[in-house]
Amino acid sequence: MPSAHELQVAVMRLARRMRAERGDHGLTLTQLAVLATLSRHGQMSPSDLAAHERVQPPSMTRTINGLVDLGLVERSPDPDDGRQVRVDLTHEGRTLLAQDRAQREEWLSRQMADLTPEERATMKKAASILDRLASS
């Protein structure tokens, strides 16, 4: 069993390598994380986004403002509470996120093609375990 330190180093190295495969779209990691969260969970309130991304609401407001300015997300009134707003991806946001994901997935697929069938099976199991750890 790997130590916590070994796992941390391996995950950090892979994450860094995956970031290097991103296109040059000029977005911050926080902005990309917000786009991905909206893609996975659908429209959300700014406060829900802040809680999900574990940032302070004023920081999330700045992030959302930047994404609105870029045309990647839009605000709309909350249908249940007119005092609140919901944030959702625009078509441009969905397109950018899909292109970003495809580029990184293509790189990772090429790397995984060199693994043995046993290694790929191990990676499949590890992916669900890592996702569970990340969600805790």
Image (spheres, rainbow, N blue to C red):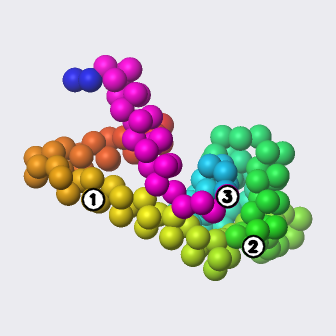
Q: Horizontal placement of 94 versus 63: left or right?
A: left
Q: Which residue has dot 1 on it?
A: 110
Task: Identify residue type, mark 1.
Answer: Arg
Q: CA distance from mark 2 to mark 3?
A: 14 Å
Q: Secondary structure at mark 2?
A: loop
Disc 3: CA contacts within 10 A as few (<14), some (14-19) or many (>=20): few
Q: Which residue has dot 3 on it?
A: 26
Q: Is residue 80 visible?
A: no
Indicate the position of residue 29 as horizontal and vertical percent values. Answer: 62, 49
Disc 2: CA contacts within 10 A as few (<14), some (14-19) or many (>=20): some
Q: Please, is residue 21 above or below residue 1 in the view?
A: below
**Mark 2 or mark 3, which is nearer to you?**
3
Residue at horizontal 89 percent and vertical 65 percent from the top: 83
Q: Are marks 1 and 2 in contact (CB under 8 Å)?
A: no
Residues in magenta, as a range: 3-26
Task: Identify residue type, mark 3.
Answer: Gly
Q: CA distance from mark 3 to mark 1?
A: 25 Å
Which quarter of the figure is the N terminus placed in?
Answer: top left
Q: Please, is residue 42 above or below residue 7 in the view?
A: below
Residue at horizontal 72 percent and vertical 69 percent from the top: 73
Q: Horizontal placement of 29 versus 100: left or right?
A: right
Task: Identify residue type, mark 2.
Answer: Gly
